[in-house]
Image (cartoon, coloured by chain):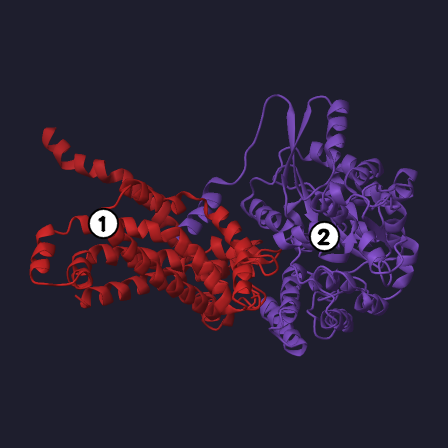
């Protein structure tokens, strides 16, 4: 225990972070996963002499968010521009004073450059602009062409997409599928079904917990349970080593893939599976899962310069570049309609027209309100689903447990 | 002047320890206690709530679950480990070929990084392609989903701990054994006592202080068990220690509350209760081991 206490105390006492000063202004950008900004930094540095940019990246979002909370809490270490994933953003929207109001840096006029719902997510009730949208987690369904062909199914992406207009049909296809499990893990599929259930999930828009009264949550749960009971899940936790290995071993034939996940799939599957993966439309209507914002913490000593950089990175051109680099799908309508995005095909995924697939998904979507503890609640629901996969709980008991855990968490 | 020196110099000599202890030992303890009496989240310090956090904690089933898990794994890890260490030490106390090599060899697991141990053993105890299930398969036992049950996950985690620390404890015992006077064994041999009898009647009583030390140290380490189960858990919500918290330890529970749910006040209360539990267990251990003299 002393070790952990010491750790906490060190951060409280000393602050966790460093500052660099050498005539130039160094802007520190904090990101997680892959934002694909490298080329943009070089370009910005070239056009802004005296500005140096340093990106500090943490691979997993799960590791990044506690660190971020710590930086914000201690008032040190958050750098000049921070990436906020939409689930975390909701928590910070309750305390917008920790961030610079970007209205003061001329961001108000940028509103038409963003999808309206994306823009609103980072604006407080009294009009303060906390962050600017980067990408949206446009939804697609990735599948293994070769495994589909081996199972006697069509492998062409149009025909595959036509197999599953709804999740019910997806389950039907899965039941008859032979040769591998149909998808990776119930938690991931559940998340995608859930995000298609309309206006809100665990919280209503007044931040009241409605996990047990919102029929959308229950519907997503029931659909997922049906899939588990049909034996479609490979039962490997997302982001675990088994999951990583599963890509290489062909342990599962489909995986619902938000645009930002394509980079991960490519990395984990490796060059030998190039051209074996493909992307098609997701069952049901379009949906988003994830997506981020850039914000400028109040603790930054260069708020003006940082705001300029954030505006540049989240501009239509910045978003297009990030998309081409890592498939992070733009939240700027101008970028979405940019031929460079619209006509973009991904060579790793059999030249799938990902720009078009994700663009259609984004246009079909209805924005979903998340609420403060949505991540923590979702973790508990996913755990309950895992317990069903493991055969440790009946679906009914697991549901009760998930609801109780959520209520206990929110208190 | 000289008398002043001799009066204050000793205090000055011991001061570094006390200064460092105050800064890194005492202050965090006291500060944690202070935080635990408040409603304290990422927004900063809320109001003073007295013992509310502790009341909630004692009614929190997840905390009791974590306590049971921790003690369960503590027993599974400590008991075989110390027995194994005793046997290993008495073997290393014989005249063997390559003795130094063997003695150094038992130290190897300790210099291995705990993260590496966690990763390797997690692969061994993998459900689909793990070596443990492979070996069980040879015996005709159907594969075990190591993460799914308490007994299986505890076994897997205790195995990591045992593998890592048995050698270390063996060396401590070995050092103590070498200090046992040889004439005791000679006298016992003359009286016709067997090797086993000698071990239990001479060796064990004579190395009791070492045993006491290792029992207490293992207890403290066991109560703080964190990295092994965390790496074993894997996935995005690993800190919960399994889908039904099958192997979440109290340290993991504290971390989850403080740094995942950002309930610092509650997390601090957990930290203090862990501290008290460790103290309690150490005292109990001490009394048991001393009384059985």
Q: Position of residue A116 (x, y in %)?
A: 85, 51
Spot occupied by residue B154 in the image (x, y as percentages of width and height): 47, 64
Q: Secondary structure at mark 1?
A: loop
Q: Which quadrant would residue A226 be assigned to in this image?
A: bottom right
- Considering the numbered disc 2 on the image, is that residue within a helix, a strand or a loop? helix
**Chain A display color:** purple
Residue at x-position 69% and y-position 55%: A87
Q: Colour of chain B?
A: red
Q: Which residue is mark 2?
A: A86
Placement of A79 over or under A372, stated as above or below: above
Quarter residue B275 falls in: bottom left
Residue B241 visible, this orientation:
no
Q: Is residue A227 left or right of residue A77?
A: right
Residue at (54% x, 45% y) in the render? A74
- Residue at 82% over, 52% down: A146
Crowding at mark 1 (Cα within 10 Å: few <14, some 14-19, many 20+): some
């Amino acid at each position: 225990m002393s070790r952990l206490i010491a750790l906490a105390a060190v951060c409280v006492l000393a602050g966790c972070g460093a500052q660099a000063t050498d005539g130039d202004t160094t802007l520190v950008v904090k990101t997680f996963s892959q934002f694909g900004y490298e080329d943009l930094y070089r370009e910005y540095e070239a056009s802004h002499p005296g500005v140096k940019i340093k990106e500090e990246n943490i691979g997993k979002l799960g590791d990044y968010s506690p660190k971020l909370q710590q930086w914000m809490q201690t008032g040190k270490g958050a750098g000049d521009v921070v990436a906020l994933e939409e689930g975390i953003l909701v928590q910070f929207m309750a305390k917008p004073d920790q961030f610079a109001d970007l209205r003061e840096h001329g961001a108000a006029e940028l509103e038409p450059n963003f999808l309206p719902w994306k823009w609103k997510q980072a604006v407080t009730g009294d009009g303060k602009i906390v962050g600017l949208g980067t990408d949206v987690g446009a939804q697609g369904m990735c599948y293994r062409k070769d495994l589909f062909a081996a199972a006697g199914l069509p492998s062409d992406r149009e025909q595959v997409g036509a197999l599953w207009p709804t999740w019910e049909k997806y389950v039907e296809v899965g039941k008859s599928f032979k040769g591998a499990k149909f998808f990776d893990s119930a938690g991931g599929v559940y998340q995608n079904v859930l995000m298609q259930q309309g206006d809100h999930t665990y919280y209503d828009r007044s931040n009241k917990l409605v996990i047990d009264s919102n029929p959308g949550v229950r519907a997503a749960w029931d659909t997922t349970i049906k899939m588990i009971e049909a034996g479609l899940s490979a039962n490997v936790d997302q982001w675990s080593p088994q999951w990583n290995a599963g890509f290489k071993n062909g342990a599962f034939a489909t995986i619902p893939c938000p645009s930002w996940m394509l980079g991960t799939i490519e990395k984990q599957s490796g060059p030998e599976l190039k051209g074996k993966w493909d992307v098609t439309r997701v069952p049901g209507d379009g949906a988003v899962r994830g997506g981020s914002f850039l914000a400028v913490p109040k603790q930054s000593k260069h708020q003006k310069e940082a705001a300029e950089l954030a505006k540049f990175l989240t501009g239509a051109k910045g978003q297009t570049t990030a998309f081409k680099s890592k498939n992070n799908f733009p939240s700027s309508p101008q970028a979405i309609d940019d031929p460079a995005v619209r006509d973009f095909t991904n060579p790793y995924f059999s030249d799938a027209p990902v720009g078009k697939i994700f663009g259609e998904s984004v246009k079909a979507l209805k924005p979903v309100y998340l609420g403060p503890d949505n991540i923590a609640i979702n973790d508990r629901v996913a755990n309950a689903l895992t317990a069903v996969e493991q055969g440790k709980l009946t679906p009914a008991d697991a549901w009760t447990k998930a609801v109780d855990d959520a209520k206990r968490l929110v208190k | 002047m000289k008398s002043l020196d001799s009066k204050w110099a000793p205090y000055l000599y011991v001061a570094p320890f006390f200064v460092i202890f105050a800064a890194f030992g005492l202050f965090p303890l006291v500060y944690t206690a202070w935080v635990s009496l408040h409603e304290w989240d990422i927004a900063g310090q809320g109001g003073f709530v007295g013992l509310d956090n502790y009341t909630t904690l004692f009614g929190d089933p997840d905390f009791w679950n974590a306590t049971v898990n921790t003690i369960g794994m503590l027993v599974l890890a400590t008991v075989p480990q110390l027995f194994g260490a005793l046997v290993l030490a008495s073997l290393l106390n014989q005249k063997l070929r390559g003795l130094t090599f063997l003695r150094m060899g038992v130290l190897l697991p300790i210099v291995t990084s705990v993260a590496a141990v966690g990763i390797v053993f997690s692969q061994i105890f993998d459900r689909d392609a793990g070596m443990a299930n492979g070996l069980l398969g040879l015996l005709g036992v159907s594969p075990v989903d190591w993460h799914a049950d308490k007994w299986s996950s505890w076994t897997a985690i205790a195995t990591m701990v045992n593998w890592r620390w048995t050698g270390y404890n063996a060396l401590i015992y070995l050092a103590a054994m070498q200090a046992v006077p040889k004439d005791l064994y000679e006298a016992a041999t003359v009286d016709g006592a067997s090797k086993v009898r000698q071990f239990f009647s001479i060796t064990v009583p004579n190395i009791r202080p070492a045993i006491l030390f290792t029992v207490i140290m293992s207890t403290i380490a066991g109560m703080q068990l964190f990295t092994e189960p965390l790496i074993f858990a894997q996935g995005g919500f690993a800190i919960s220690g399994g889908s039904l918290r099958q192997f979440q330890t109290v340290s993991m529970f504290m971390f989850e509350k403080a740094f995942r749910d950002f309930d610092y006040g509650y997390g601090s209360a957990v930290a203090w209760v862990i501290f008290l539990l460790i103290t309690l267990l150490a005292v109990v251990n001490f009394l048991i081991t001393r009384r059985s003299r």
